Image (cartoon, coloured by chain):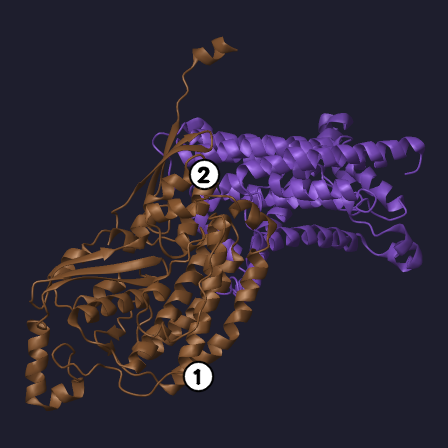
Amino acid sequence: MIGSVTSFLASFIGEPMANMVLNIVIILIKVVVVIAVTLLHVAYATYWERKVIGHMQLRLGPREVGPYGLFQPFADGIKLFFKEDIIPANSDKPIFYLAPVIFFVSALTSLSVLPFFDGGWVSNINVGLLFLLGMSSIGAYGIVMSGWSSGSKYSFLGGLRSASQVISYEIAMGLSLVGVMIMAGTLNLTEIVKAQYNYPTGFYALPQILGFFVFYVAMFAETNRLPFDLPEAESELVAGYFTEYSGFRFALFFLGEYTGMLIMSSIGTLCFLGGWTLPKFVMDALPFLGSLPKFVWVAVFLVKVYFFMFLFYWVRATLPRYRYDQLMNIGWKVLIPLALVNIMITGTLKIMGWV
Amino acid sequence: MEDIEKSFETKELTISLGPQHPATHGVLRLVLQLSGETIVKCTPYVGYLHRGVEKLGENRTYFAALPLTDRLDYISSMNNNVGYVNAVERLFGIEAPDRAKYIRTMVAEMGRISSHIVWLGTHVLDIGATTPFLLSMAQRERILDLFEMICGARLTVSYPRVGGVRNDISQEFLDQLYEFVLEFPAHMDTFETLVTENRIWKERTVDIGIISAEEAVNWGLTGGTLRGSGVDYDVRKYFPYDAYDKVEFDVPVGKKGDCYDRYLVRIGEMRQANRIIKQCIENLPAGPVMADAPKFTLPPKDMVLKDMEHLIHQFILITKGPSVPEGEIYVGSEVPKGELGFYFISDGTGKPYRMRVRSPSFIHASVLPRLSEGGLIADVIANIGTIDIVLGECDR
């Protein structure tokens, strides 16, 4: 069918052009599908969070809208969409408008390089991991700009905190992933997953236990979640950088944050837990698994991602919040040295040819 | 480098924390001058919840001013009532019967648990942990239900009366309370598992807001805020009222006087309060619950409806008030926040010439700059939580 469409188009604009147009159309469709599916996941990540934390806290979570409260995320979305959009009088308006867009778009852009199963990606680029780190840094611009432009001191402090936090933990996170890069010998996420599949343990969390630990801690700081949710510390800074936002602009921050969580969970899954694969020895022991359709592997991927998401929720329900200077101490004095040690060990072992 | 520094002007950032802020426990307003995130100067502003309780008290009979004390520290209205009626009884020169004393001790300690448990939940919530807040609210709910059983009200109880308590308690209430008392230590263990040894919690509270014993006394601190510094002053021990001299309990004290010590003291107080309630239930004597002092206590309602003399008696007491001996008196009582004192000047009429409330929250709010200056914003939040203020009482 695709062939007939190509030849039909080719009769008008020539074959090379037709191929290009078709590619663009296919990529656009992929983009729409990925964004739609992710946003659906984001919506139900919030629902699931409220349910999980609710049950941890002797509550039931949402249960009024639809059966078991299943339509609650849509009710929230509709509510936010129709809320009045309040712009503070002394805000820097162009930046104020732009900040949530940057935050949200940078989160969504990260999705373009994530492989959900073998072949399930929007684009398969060679520097996928670097691209993801870069995008999460750009997200910090959205936070800083929103804090700066709101014209509120609380937002300003939240923005400042976030800037320093994201910069510090970006380093730790990047360094923690270097071990994975050394072991896999590539930055391409699909290749990393395949390298893990062929590795004896089946995932890198075990040899890269230090790196995994550093990544796991830095993940919370990157996504501004408890115990590192200082930029939006409710009891200190009201809501931090998005204090002055309302309506759909607030929703963009909210969606961006949860998309960020999903992306961080995906990076963790892809780099440390073997992505959509099961370890090779499992596959060898149970050969019928090889003949299963692809959606099963998407499910494996999602289970791993939601395992990380569950950890986010669990920690949020359990731990108090660190103080700003303690956060910096952990970042610079614990995580970064640990990550460097990890790189040295991994590098040495790699040179010796032991990994 | 110096040229660059000269080329722009730097100044401290002034932010107003409150009066509407999630962590200021009501309408406290702190004006903070920040250098980076370090607090250079902290100025508390109070008065946003001022309702003139003291002045209102001067225009009401001693009986009618009782509900005003509900609204002082609205988290622990029972304790305020008990403090108020004790002061008034001392002024009148009457004494409540034993059963009433035990009941008042019991309900006051219930009030202490419910107040401390709200403090625990909100303090921990301010530091960022959400779960203990909901767990503690669940326990508070049980106490409020018990309050509802004895007097029909959950928050503004007005249950103790001058000369005793409003009505006797039922066996059903005692059974349920006993059940609660037996279960409560296990719930406290749950809170402590979540919080006490939590590493982040300790990093946030240990060595934060240190105040030495001497300084704490000089600032006029009382209650858990003082005992955290190692001073064992407790009105219940030093000037016992109600049945406190007949029950056994310890006064937990801290060592260093930091946020963590004050936290441990209040946790200990809850366990002690539980112990006191248990003893009160077990040793509850039989007998009347109102003093036999017709000149100073309202006659029983069923008699008022039947009998002319009682009706006239009640009418006089309600409209004119009792004939109070002239003089002045200060009576302190240990409420969850500290020492709540009532000071009356009586000119012989049915209304006080002057009613003054010594509010622990007001005094504790004044120590905030001392605790917070030099620290970070996050420490202010820990300090506000740990001195345990309620603005209804602070502003009166």
Q: Chain of mark 1?
A: B
Q: CA distance from mark 2 to mark 1?
A: 46 Å
Chain A appears what colour?
purple
| Callout 2: SS | helix
| Residue lying at 46% horizontally and 48% vertically, measured from the top left | B257
Q: Earlier in the sequence, mark 2 or mark 1?
A: 1
Q: Which mark is residue A103?
A: none
In the image, the chain rendered in brown is: B
Where B309 sits versus B119, above or below?
below
Where A123 sits versus B395, above or below?
above
Question: As shown in the figure, which amino acid type bears the numbered disc 1?
Answer: Asp
Q: Which mark is residue B175?
A: 1
Q: Is residue A264 visible?
A: yes
Q: Quadrant of residue B161?
A: bottom left
Q: Which mark is residue B377?
A: 2
Where A57 sits versus B209, above or below?
below
Residue B199: % across, % down? 60, 49
Q: Is residue A58 left or right of residue B341?
A: right
Within 10 Å of disc 1 (Cα), the crowding (few <14, some 14-19, many 20+) is: few
Residue A63: % across, % down? 51, 65
Q: Is residue B310 left or right of residue B222?
A: left
| Residue lying at 56% horizontally and 53% vertically, measured from the top left | A46
Residue B124: % across, % down? 49, 53
**Residue sitting nearer the eye, B13 or A212:** B13
